[in-house]
Every structure is written in structure tokens, then in C-alpha cells.
Image: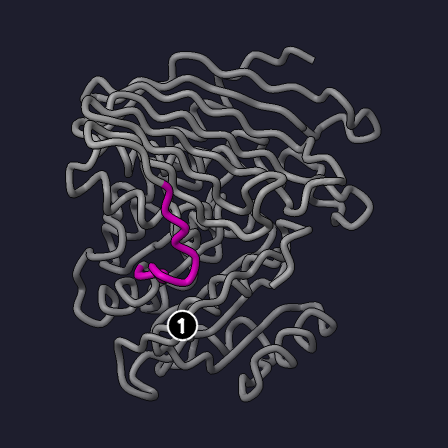
């Protein structure tokens, strides 16, 4: 698995099927972002059958079929949506197209799994909420920086089990490598990608809500900037925000596109969680200058200090839980309200952001 370019970062894990062969058939529609590979990896490892793929770009389809032998290339999106055997559609189209694709999938009786950001406007979010209520279908969101990072999964379990007491504050750092020359045109157009706090800030906000156990939050302050991408005036290469949860927990996060070329991963993702009885630090993708492998968890509590390297030990339970949720109409993987709330707060932070450069 390559770690240099976050756009094509697609983790793999051990196969842990939760359903029988052919019991849960899925399709991929919209291959504009490489996250579709991580999404499909997780679902296939959990037992899904990847049956169909569609994208208007034949080159993208050819690469996808080469990666997943046996998947059939559909002639149109409609062919996928009209297939009664397809239970879920996974989509990583251009961000502004993800919400509308979900509406079409749900209207055809499919559950839907979108890459983040799932929406670039409040209107898209509210349309999805209405469609979920009307159809009873699921609209899941791939918040990969928690769902597909073993250190982040492990931290959630530690917090749930009371390892650090009540969560008081979360700090999230989400730096990314730009690789501007390899990015498509839509990546730099705000109406298409939504702004930095929507695009990659939504990862951070979802983690805060999950770790703090918050049912709601307010955006206190947010900022965005374009410090070094003058050739793309609509692009934002820096953003930060402060939030306050309904249970009193606070949150600060920073996201940026300034990962230097010398780092051995696309970003030095860190998360710090302070509790009443201790704290946790996550070094997600590497431990700088010490270990090129990620998934490092540092814990300090009343008993002492410890370091746990959990790579390959935890797995990615979200995907199996999502399949079971679709089959059994439950909410193991992630409550629908939570998935939408993270996007709502990201949209609010983006709307309220002060432009500082």
C-alpha cells in the first residue's frame, strides 16, 4: 500500500466476512477519487461481492476492473441502479456530485456509501436527510481517518471502556501532501470540492463527535487561507476551527496541504484526546523519524505511561458492521444522525470561516 499520496491511499486488512458468498452485492459508481479503492477494499474484506462498476471515463473503469478481477463494467449508471441484486452503491465521484448520486441510489431502493465530503452545501445535506426519511435507506459516509486507521479504532475502544475517564478535549491535526501536478481540475474549484473545512475538516469533526460522545456541537470560530496556491485562487491550503460540544467537551483542529516532500507519508496525522483520568495521543500514519509504519497509540493514565503499536492487530470493524446494518436494518457501524451531523458542522465551519490570506 502506497502512503505518499493521500488521494490514492487505500488500506487493506484481513478478510473477516460477516455474510455468505453472494449475500450482499455492491456496485461502485463514480471513480473520481482514489478513496473508492479503500471503500471497496473494506467492504470486500467483510464479505461483500463487488459485482458492477460504472464511470463515464473508460480509463478509470479499466484500472478498477484490473484491481478487482471479476467485477463487470456496466454500460451506464442506470444499469447499476436498475439491477435489483445490487444492495449498496459506493461512490467517490467529484464531491459536488456525491449527494445527488446518493439520492438516485436511494430512490432505486439501494443503500449508499459516499466518500467524504458527502455534500458541498446545506441544500444537498437536507435533501439527503429527506430522502433517508422517505425511503428508509442508509446514507453512510467514509470518514476514513477514523474508520480505516487501526490506531483510531483502538482509541475509540479505549475511550468507550473508560481508560481516560470523561473526554474533556480533542485536538486533531490533519496535514496533507498537495501533489498539485497530479490533481484534477475539480480539486481546485470550490463549488466542486466544498472548501478545506468541508473536504478534509469533516474527518476531524467526525472524530471529535465520536470520541467525545457528543450528540451536538457548535462552531465557535473558524479560519481558512490560501498561503501558497496563488495559481488556484479558489483553493484553500489551510484551515482551522474550534468547536464546543453539548456535553462540554471542546475541540480544536487544523487541516492543511503543507506536508513536506521529506515525510514518509502523505501526512503526519495526529489526534490528542484529554480525559479526566488520562490522555491518548495517536500517531496515525508513521512515527516521525522513528518508525515508517503507522498506528501508534500513546496512553498516559494513573498507572503510568505506555505505547501500543496496533498495526495489524485491530482491523476495520466498520465495514462488516455496515454490511450487517444494511442486511438487518440496524445501526452498528455509525448512526445516521452522526454521519450527517459531522457534515453539517463542517459545512457550518466553512460558511462561517474568516478568510485570513
Tell me the quarter of the picture where residue 177 sits. Answer: top right
Residue beneath disc 1? 14
* Percent position of residue 72, x then y: 55, 85
Q: Is residue 66 left or right of residue 255?
A: right
Q: Is residue 332 magenta?
A: no
Q: Is residue 92 left or right of residue 211?
A: right
The residue that appears at 61% across and 59% down in the rendered structure is 34
Q: Is residue 315 magenta?
A: yes
State whether residue 137 is above or below residue 67.
Answer: above
The residue that appears at 23% across and 48% down in the rendered structure is 335
Categorize mark 1 by other alpha carbons within 10 Å: few (<14), some (14-19), many (20+): few
Q: Over which residues does the magenta segment extend? A: 307-317
Q: Is residue 186 left or right of residue 351?
A: right
* Percent position of residue 31, x then y: 61, 63
Quarter of the picture containing the C terminus is top right
The residue that appears at 62% across and 49% down in the rendered structure is 6
* Percent position of residue 158, x then y: 23, 43
Amino acid at each position: 500500500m502506497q502512503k505518499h499520496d493521500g488521494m490514492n491511499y487505500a488500506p487493506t486488512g484481513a478478510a473477516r466476512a460477516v455474510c455468505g458468498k453472494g449475500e450482499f452485492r455492491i456496485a461502485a459508481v463514480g471513480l473520481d477519487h482514489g478513496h473508492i479503492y479503500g471503500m471497496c477494499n473494506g467492504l470486500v474484506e467483510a464479505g461483500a461481492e463487488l459485482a458492477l462498476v460504472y464511470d463515464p471515463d473508460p480509463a478509470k473503469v479499466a484500472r478498477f476492473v484490473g484491481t478487482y478481477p471479476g467485477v463487470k463494467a456496466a454500460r451506464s449508471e442506470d444499469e447499476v441502479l436498475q439491477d435489483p441484486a445490487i444492495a449498496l452503491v459506493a461512490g467517490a465521484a467529484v464531491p459536488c456530485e456525491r449527494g445527488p448520486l446518493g439520492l438516485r441510489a436511494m430512490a432505486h431502493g439501494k443503500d449508499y456509501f459516499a466518500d467524504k465530503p458527502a455534500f458541498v452545501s446545506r441544500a444537498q445535506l437536507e435533501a439527503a436527510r429527506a430522502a433517508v426519511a422517505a425511503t428508509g435507506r442508509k446514507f453512510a459516509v467514509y470518514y476514513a481517518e477514523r474508520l480505516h486507521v487501526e490506531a483510531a479504532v483502538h482509541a475509540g475502544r479505549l475511550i468507550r471502556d473508560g481508560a481516560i475517564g470523561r473526554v474533556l478535549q480533542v485536538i486533531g491535526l490533519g496535514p496533507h501532501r498537495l501533489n498539485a501536478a497530479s490533481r484534477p481540475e475539480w480539486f481546485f474549484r470550490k463549488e466542486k470540492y466544498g472548501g478545506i473545512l468541508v473536504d478534509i475538516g469533516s474527518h476531524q469533526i467526525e472524530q471529535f463527535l465520536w470520541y467525545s460522545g457528543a450528540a451536538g456541537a457548535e462552531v465557535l470560530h473558524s479560519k481558512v487561507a490560501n498561503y501558497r496556491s496563488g495559481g488556484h485562487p479558489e483553493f484553500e491550503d489551510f484551515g482551522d476551527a474550534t468547536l464546543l460540544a453539548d456535553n462540554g467537551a471542546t475541540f480544536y483542529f487544523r487541516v492543511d496541504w503543507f506536508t513536506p516532500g521529506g515525510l514518509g507519508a502523505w501526512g503526519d496525522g495526529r489526534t490528542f484526546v484529554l480525559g479526566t483520568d488520562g490522555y491518548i495521543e495517536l500517531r496515525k500514519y508513521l512515527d516521525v523519524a522513528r518508525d515508517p509504519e503507522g498506528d501508534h497509540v500513546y496512553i498516559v493514565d494513573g498507572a503510568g505511561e505506555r505505547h501500543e503499536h496496533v498495526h495489524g492487530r485491530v482491523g476495520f470493524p466498520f465495514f462488516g458492521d455496515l454490511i450487517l446494518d444494511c442486511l438487518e436494518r440496524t445501526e452498528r457501524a455509525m448512526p445516521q444522525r452522526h454521519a450527517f451531523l459531522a457534515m453539517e458542522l463542517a459545512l457550518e465551519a466553512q460558511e462561517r470561516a474568516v478568510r485570513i490570506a
